[in-house]
């Protein structure tokens, strides 16, 4: 029986359903579906990821301009529902994190999804306007300088501190750390440690972490400084 006096979003069953729904909504492969409509399987093109960035570089600006806001809403919607259900801060924060996890590891796509940046930005939009503005400004500046990947890393690495200093709920600052971990893990998806296979470009953890750069089969194969000799 539901706990008396608790809002729907604060009841154990309500919280569980909220988090499960956030994961499932965040995992809807919108980028992949739009790519398929254009005759492209994003899993086999570019970086192999199914998010906005790979769609932009593989298919074009217009499809990416449609998918980007939709993926933003995949992160925003679960947090909005949590607030409408009067869920406590920790439940609303975790709903945003679940959406990011769903985007990066969707059950629909054998747990290989997108980078999770757009959905993460949507999640934090309702957490804190200060944190959202901080991330947005850095991402826009990075895009203008053609250094989007380092800018995204810097923005989200600094987000927990910004949320803490802005006196947002500690739940949001702590959950932001989880989002950073998710974004970094997605950059290392498929990373190979050690010597590159014959004919394949070497993999560099520096390029992965800072520049989100996945080696292509067509790239030359000089050994990076961080590869195992």
Image (cartoon, grey):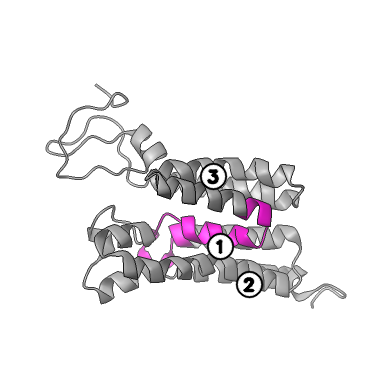
* Callout 2 crowding tier (Cα within 10 Å): few <14, some 14–19, many ≥20: some
Q: Name the residue under label 2.
A: 17
Question: In this picture, which residue range is highlighted in magenta?
Answer: 103-132
Q: Is residue 202 magenta?
A: no
Image vertical order of residue 190 relative to residue 61, above or below: above
State the image coordinates of residue 95 (x, y, percent, origin top left): 62, 63
Q: In which quarter of the image is the N terminus?
A: bottom right
- Rendered image quadrant of residue 216: top left
Image vertical order of residue 56 relative to residue 73, above or below: above
Please tell me whether mark 3 sits on a helix, a strand or a loop.
Answer: helix
Q: Which of marks 1 and 2 is nearer the N terminus?
A: 2
Instruction: Tell me the residue at 65%/70% (across/down).
Output: 80
Horizontal relation, residue 111 to residue 6: left or right: left
Q: Which of marks 1 and 3 is nearer the N terminus?
A: 1
Q: Mark 3 points at which residue?
A: 155
State the image coordinates of residue 63 (x, y, percent, origin top left): 33, 70
State the image coordinates of residue 180 (x, y, percent, origin top left): 54, 46
| Direction top: furthest residue | 229
Q: Can residue 20 be seen in this view?
A: no
| Circle 2 or circle 3, nearest the eye | 3
Instruction: Tell me the residue at 54%/50% (across/down).
Output: 137
Q: Which of marks 2 and 3 is nearer the N terminus?
A: 2
Instruction: Tell me the residue at 22%/68% (across/down).
Output: 40
Give residue 122's mark.
Answer: 1
Q: Nearer the viewer, residue 156 or 145?
A: 145
Image vertical order of residue 123 relative to residue 196, above or below: below
Please tell me whether mark 2 sits on a helix, a strand or a loop.
Answer: helix
Please tell me whether mark 1 sits on a helix, a strand or a loop.
Answer: helix
State the image coordinates of residue 126 (x, y, percent, origin top left): 66, 63
């Amino acid at each position: 029986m539901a706990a008396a006096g608790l809002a729907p979003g604060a009841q154990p069953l309500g919280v569980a359903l909220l988090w499960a729904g956030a994961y499932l909504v965040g995992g809807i492969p919108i980028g992949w579906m739009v790519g398929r409509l254009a005759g492209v399987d994003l899993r086999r093109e570019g970086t192999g990821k199914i998010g906005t960035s790979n769609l932009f570089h593989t298919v074009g600006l217009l499809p990416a301009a449609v998918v980007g806001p939709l993926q933003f809403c995949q992160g925003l919607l679960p947090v909005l529902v949590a607030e409408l259900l009067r869920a406590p801060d920790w439940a609303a924060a975790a709903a945003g994190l679940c959406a990011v996890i769903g985007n990066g590891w969707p059950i629909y796509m054998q747990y290989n999804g997108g980078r999770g940046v757009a959905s993460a930005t949507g999640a934090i939009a309702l957490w804190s306007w200060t944190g959202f503005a901080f991330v947005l400004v850095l991402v826009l500046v990075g895009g203008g300088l053609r250094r989007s990947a380092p800018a995204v890393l810097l923005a989200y690495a600094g987000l927990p501190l910004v949320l803490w200093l802005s006196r947002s709920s500690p739940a949001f600052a702590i959950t932001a750390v989880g989002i950073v971990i998710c974004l970094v893990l997605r950059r290392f998806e498929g990373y190979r440690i050690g010597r590159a296979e014959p004919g394949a470009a070497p993999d560099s953890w520096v390029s992965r972490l800072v520049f989100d750069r996945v080696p292509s089969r067509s790239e030359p194969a000089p050994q990076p400084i961080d590869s195992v000799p």
